[in-house]
Structures are given as structure tokens and as C-alpha cells.
């Protein structure tokens, strides 16, 4: 099992290019099921999750190829309606196949999802919404069996603005008969990107980017060619890396308008952030100021940046608090950061982080995608060698992160085995 060896401390300097967004790409890949034709996605990151979704599509009868960031998928001859456990268990976004299969073919059999190993994230909202659209759903030996002679538009009120549920319901509702209204819909840029792609292919979606979406069902979705939007979480991670190392990093190919909450908290820490079209430059402070952070649904501070900012605050001069409002159990990185010398007290959904003068390198273990990146950031600022185990997690969400960090001056290498 591969690991990272990082020797710190270092000061990152230079420029880095942001990859396409995993959380935008995966819904778009699932949307190809709706088209019955050949689709092309550009700016696709080469990630473990990309490969997993390609394998899932292939099982369904949608072969695809990925070359130099361009993914071609052919959905003209789908032969299966089942997403098997051995694929779905490794990536939660595999559940996105449920909505389009049901809408296109009137049936679907999808394993209950797996993914990161922190906290319960049930698919109840997905299933309740599909039932509202007229689907008959049963849970059979760990599989979701769904069927419907024809989905029909309905008003669906989500109890929370779940990105996953919003995606699945969009992919189902575009071919439903009549109008579907999704209240309390997710507002993330990835949702707007999916809506734009579907509208360009013949869908009739309005209200994306707001909490109320309206979808007028159409008879068919055409094959599409789209460019995947930049990964705002990767951009935020490199911004946090500049802050914790006191470096200066120019982040290219990003979309600063998607990152207001992250930029605001970085500036509160003392970092200087300059933004322009498609780029931002982050200058880390001489000493990080303590701040309080509360995660929430977009446009609030993203839960996917919580771990990285916790790493930054481990070097602040004073105490900070982080309140996790989205996933209360998303703190598996805390014990590993403490192995590096961090002072963190966790109580319920709140972590109190008291900054220390220095962190010390140590062997640590990654538990999920964002915990992995937090450990990398802490290791960059720590004295001596850090070995990060189980880095297959970070390969799910970051494209060649060690190569990008090395170009910025980091001493990081991948150790095979």
C-alpha cells in the first residue's frame, strides 16, 4: 500500500494548476446514461474515483475512454441496470446511477453505497424523492430495487440541501412527465454545472444555484460535450497550504467566485488573497491568527475544507474553534493531527484548536480524502519526517498532488508498497 514521505518544514512558492472538480465530474458521467449516445467531458481529472465510475459505466454497457483529460462515453447500448456492490462500496457517488437508470429505462438495481469511513450518510432523501416521483422502491439484500412505468413530476421538499439527493432527483426528473419542483435544493456550483450541461442537451431546468429548482420533464436528453468546472476544494487546499507554510502560491485555473467563504476565513487568519479571472494568489502570514469556523451548506464554509483549515489553525497563535454543522462525526483526522503535536479538544461537533509553536513529524494514517490532505498540510509545516499511510484515499480526490507540491518546493515522495 503506497504512502507519502514528507520532510518539513518548507515554504511553498510558485504556481499550480487546479484540476477539474471530482464532485462535478461524477454527476456528469452518470448523466451520460440519459443520452443513449456518445458524450464527451473535458478537463476530467485522472483520479481513482474517475476510474471507478468508468468501471461502473462499463458494467452498465457504457464504455468510456480517458485520454489527456478528455473522457468519451458511449451510452448507445446499455445492457444492464445493476450497479454491483464491489464497485458501489468504494465510492458513494455510484448511487448517482440510480436516478438516470430509473428515468431512462424504468428500472434500476443499485447497491447501497459505501465511500469514506466517517459518519452515517443515509440515502433516505434520494429514495423519498424518487418515491415522490412515482417510483416503487424496495431494499433487497443490500440493494436498492427501483421501478416505475413512468416517473411523474412532483413537489419534493428536502429536509436538508443534500448535494447527492439533489443530483439524483435532477437526473430522474429531467425525463419525468410534467413539472418537478425541488425545495431546499443544494446550491453548490457543481449543481449549477450539471444543470447547465443538461439544459444544453435539451433539459428544461431553472432555479439552479437557488434553493428552489423547477424541472419541466422532456422526452429525451441529447448527447453532450461539456468542460468540467475547476475543483474549488483542491484550490482551497493549495490556498491553505500557502497559509500554513507562510509561502506564496499562485493558483491557476480556479474559480474564485466559488470560494468566498474559504477566502474570507483565510484572510481572517492573516493571509493575503488576490483574485482575478481564473486565478488567485495566496500569501501566507508570518504568524497565523486564530479564527472560528462553522461549516454549512453552500455558500457557507464547506465541510470539505474543514480538515485542511484545522491543520492551518494548529499553527495559530491562540485558540480557534471549528463547529461541524454538516457531518458531526467528520473528525477522524483529529487523532492523527495530535500525533504530529497538535492541541485539539473535541467535544460533540466542536473542535477547539490551540495553536502550537511547532509540529513534529510522525507516522500517521489517512482516513478519508480531506483528512489525507489535512495531514499533508500539517506535515509540510512539521519539523522532520512524516510518513502518511493509506494514501489511496487522497488518490480518490486529488490528481497527482505530490507532483504539484514538489513543483512548489515541497519535499514529498510517494513510497510504493
Image (cartoon, grey):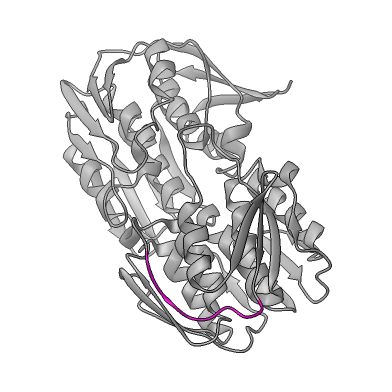
Q: Quadrant of residue 182?
A: bottom left
Does residue 152 show up magenta in the picture?
Answer: yes
Foreground residue among 325 and 343: 325
Q: Percent from the top left, x then y, of residue 280?
A: 34, 53
Compared to residue 120, the image places residue 29 above or below, namely below
**Is most of the magenta stretch helix, strand or loop?**
loop
Q: Percent from the top left, x then y, of residue 240?
A: 35, 37
Q: Quadrant of residue 206?
A: bottom left
Foreground residue among 249 and 96: 96
Q: Quadrant of the C terminus?
A: top right
Q: Which residues are magenta?
A: 149-157
Compared to residue 78, the image places residue 138 above or below, namely above
Q: Percent from the top left, x then y, of residue 22?
A: 55, 53
Compared to residue 400, the image places residue 164 above or below, namely below
Does residue 317 show up magenta in the picture?
Answer: no
Residue 70 visible in the snapshot: yes
Relative placement, left or right, of 121 versus 307 is right
Relative placement, left or right, of 1 versus 163 is right
- The residue lying at 68 percent from left, 24 percent from top is 2
Q: Percent from the top left, x then y, of residue 188?
A: 38, 61
Foreground residue among 351 and 18: 351
- The residue lying at 52 percent from left, 59 percent from top is 127
Relative placement, left or right, of 360 versus 6 is left
Residue 47 visible in the snapshot: no
Q: Number of numbered discs present?
A: 0
Foreground residue among 373 and 358: 373
- The residue lying at 31 percent from left, 13 percent from top is 358
- The residue lying at 25 percent from left, 41 percent from top is 266
Q: Quadrant of the N terminus?
A: top right
Relative placement, left or right, of 189 versus 409 is left
Amino acid at each position: 500500500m503506497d504512502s507519502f514521505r514528507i520532510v518539513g518544514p518548507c515554504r511553498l512558492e510558485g504556481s499550480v494548476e487546479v484540476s477539474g472538480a471530482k464532485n462535478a465530474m461524477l454527476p456528469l458521467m452518470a448523466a451520460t446514461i440519459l443520452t443513449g449516445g456518445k458524450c464527451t467531458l473535458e478537463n476530467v481529472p485522472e483520479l481513482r474515483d474517475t476510474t471507478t465510475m468508468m468501471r461502473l459505466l462499463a458494467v452498465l454497457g457504457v464504455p468510456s475512454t480517458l485520454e489527456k483529460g478528455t473522457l468519451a462515453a458511449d451510452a448507445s447500448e446499455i445492457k444492464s441496470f445493476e450497479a454491483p456492490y464491489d464497485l458501489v462500496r468504494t465510492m458513494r457517488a455510484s448511487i448517482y446511477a440510480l436516478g438516470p437508470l430509473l428515468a431512462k429505462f424504468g428500472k434500476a438495481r443499485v447497491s447501497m453505497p459505501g465511500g469514506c469511513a466517517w459518519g452515517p450518510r443515509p440515502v433516505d432523501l434520494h429514495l423519498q424523492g424518487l418515491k415522490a416521483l412515482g417510483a416503487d422502491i424496495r431494499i433487497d439484500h443490500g440493494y436498492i430495487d427501483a421501478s416505475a412505468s413512468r416517473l411523474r413530476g412532483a413537489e419534493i421538499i428536502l429536509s436538508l440541501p443534500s448535494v447527492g439527493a439533489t443530483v439524483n432527483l435532477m437526473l430522474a426528473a429531467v425525463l419525468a412527465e410534467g413539472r418537478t419542483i425541488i425545495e431546499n435544493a443544494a446550491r453548490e456550483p457543481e449543481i449549477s454545472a450539471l444543470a447547465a450541461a443538461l439544459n444544453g442537451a435539451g433539459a428544461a431546468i431553472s432555479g439552479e444555484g437557488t434553493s428552489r429548482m423547477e424541472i419541466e420533464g422532456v422526452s429525451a436528453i441529447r448527447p453532450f460535450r461539456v468542460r468540467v468546472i475547476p475543483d474549488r476544494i483542491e484550490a482551497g487546499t493549495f490556498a491553505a497550504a500557502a497559509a500554513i507554510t507562510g509561502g506564496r502560491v499562485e493558483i491557476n485555473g480556479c474559480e474564485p467566485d466559488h470560494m468566498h467563504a474559504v477566502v474570507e476565513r483565510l484572510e481572517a487568519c492573516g493571509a493575503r488573497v488576490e483574485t482575478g479571472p481564473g486565478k488567485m494568489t495566496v500569501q501566507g502570514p508570518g504568524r497565523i491568527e486564530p479564527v472560528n469556523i462553522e461549516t454549512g451548506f453552500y455558500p457557507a464554509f464547506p465541510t470539505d475544507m474543514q480538515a485542511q483549515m484545522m491543520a492551518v489553525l494548529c499553527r495559530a497563535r491562540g485558540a480557534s474553534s471549528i463547529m461541524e454543522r454538516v457531518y458531526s462525526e467528520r473528525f477522524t483526522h483529529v487523532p492523527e493531527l495530535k500525533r504530529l503535536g497538535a492541541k485539539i479538544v473535541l467535544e460533540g461537533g466542536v473542535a477547539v484548536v490551540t495553536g502550537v509553536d511547532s509540529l513534529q513529524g510522525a507516522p500517521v494514517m489517512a482516513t478519508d480524502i480531506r483528512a489525507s490532505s489535512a495531514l499533508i498540510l500539517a506535515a509540510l509545516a512539521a519539523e522532520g519526517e512524516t510518513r502518511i499511510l493509506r494514501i489511496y484515499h487522497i488518490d480518490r480526490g486529488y490528481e497527482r498532488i505530490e507532483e504539484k507540491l514538489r513543483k512548489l518546493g515541497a519535499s514529498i515522495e510517494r513510497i510504493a508498497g
